Image: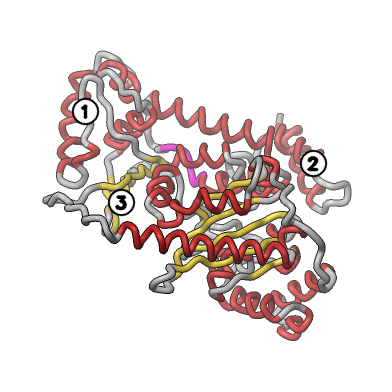
Amino acid sequence: MPSLWLTRPDRVSRAVIERAHDELLAGNLDALVAVRPLVSASWSRSVSGSVAADALPSLDLAGAELDAYRSAHPLAEALPLIRSLLLPGSHDDAGVVVAIGDASGRLLWVEGDREQRDRVGAMGFIAGANWAEESVGTAAPGTALALGRSVQVRGSEHFNRLARPWSCTAAPIRDAQSGCLLGVIDVTGGEEAATPHAQMLVDATARAVENELLVAKMRAGTAPAAVKPSRTHPLTDRACLRVLGRDLALLTLHFEGGEQSIALSLRHAEILLMLSVHRQGLTAARLAELVYGDARAISTLRPEMVRLRRVLETRAPELVPESRPYRIPPIDTDAQQLLELLDRGAHRIALSMFTGEVLPGSLAPGIDQLRSEMRRSLRETLLSEASAEALLDYVESDLGSDDVEALAQLLRMLPARSPRRTGIVARLETLSARN
């Protein structure tokens, strides 16, 4: 563990702070005198903004969209410096998690101790998640951006109850010439992540990053500007196909100056989804089998491909399918994003993304197979890796309401005196009697 994570600061007792928080949510503003002014002011902003005290953060960026955004972000250049200062030695057992976010509070990189990353991932502290005050309330990254200076938030001072096992220190990063906010650096861990020494190091790292970016900008200013070729249509930076709970899929195209969406027919959505899943490409016979259930239906598939090409040619020519085999450039799908979140341990956010089956109105064999694989992956991951909170979300959803195995496992995980046990037992008895 790095030597910076030392000593425990004095503080108001956790019980007093938690009681003040509950009283504030109940409307008692006098409770704010029990906590630090910085925290009370942030809590007030959170209440005024109708921030939920136990909600997961929104996932604003994921998959290819996240990769493209952060690769172009100015702080990408400073990653080696940040790692060398805050994560010396082996990252996987550093004892803390280091996150770098943009000026809006969206986390772009979350690195550091492997075990800690898995644990903070359960509360949505992952790349792409929004940790601005407007999203999760009082927490070091968002509050540092709101105040424009470094802050520390310790345990129960967090507005969101899910974050209370953790302490954190964060500092904003600015453009040294313009003074504009570029983003934020955050260190999250146990009590050692919110010491005076930790704040000094995070502040020093932020200043070092600002200086390095200034030097890089000055050097780049001597180079001739690249000439961009003119285009008759905007270049698609990335695309995302949204298919969960939708019969009419939505293809969202992101450009340098904004975005636009195309509503696709069910058949076109089936074709694009199959090509996005099978990125190596598909023969006409195999694509016909996946979409129509008959490898001989090539004569039906080909006119549909012509119509799909026409739809894309005027809006996103970069995505027009190639032939022999049929294939498209990599595009994101919300279904694949959900599976990525499961792999990263963000089980509750993944479950919240499941707004319905993949193209529920589709009868295509390939789509049906994808639905089954998604349900199986979601269920198996939750049963083998998820916390009790994530399993509770699962059994309360339509997807897991009748899952006897999940209910039985949840019963084993809940504390003996948990008030939720009674309802779980009653549901198990009902399902047993039904069978």
Q: Position of residue 181 (x, y in %)?
A: 45, 69
Kind of residue indicated by mark 2: Met
Q: Give the CA separation, mark 3 to mark 1.
A: 21 Å
* Res. 328 visible in picture: yes
Q: Secondary structure at mark 3?
A: strand
Numbered tag placed on residue 314 in the rendering: none
Q: Residue at x 60, y 45 (%)?
A: 346
Query: Percent position (x, y) of residue 19?
Result: 80, 72
Residue at the image position 22 percent from the left and 39 percent from the top? 318
Residue 275, quarter of the rendered image? top left
Residue under pointer 1: 322
Q: Which mark is residue 254?
A: 3
Mark number displayed over residue 413: 2
Q: Is residue 356 magenta?
A: yes
Badge 2: how crowded within 10 Å, few (<14), some, or many (20+)?
A: some
Q: Residue at x 32, y 45 (%)?
A: 238
The image shows residue 143, relative to residue 241, as above or below, that is below
What segment carries the magenta color?
A: 354-358
Contact, mark 2 vs mark 1 (Cβ under 8 Å): no
User: Looking at the image, do the residues carrying marks 3 and 2 touch, with CB atoms under 8 Å apart?
Assistant: no
Q: How dense is the environment of label 3, judged by Cα within 10 Å: few (below 14), some, or many (20 and up)?
A: some
Judge from the rendering whether residue 420 lies leftward or rightward of residue 331; answer left or right. Answer: right
Marked residue nearer the N-terminal end (3 or 2)? 3
Q: Nearer the viewer, residue 12 or 179?
A: 179
Determine whether, in the image, residue 132 is placed left or right of residue 417. left
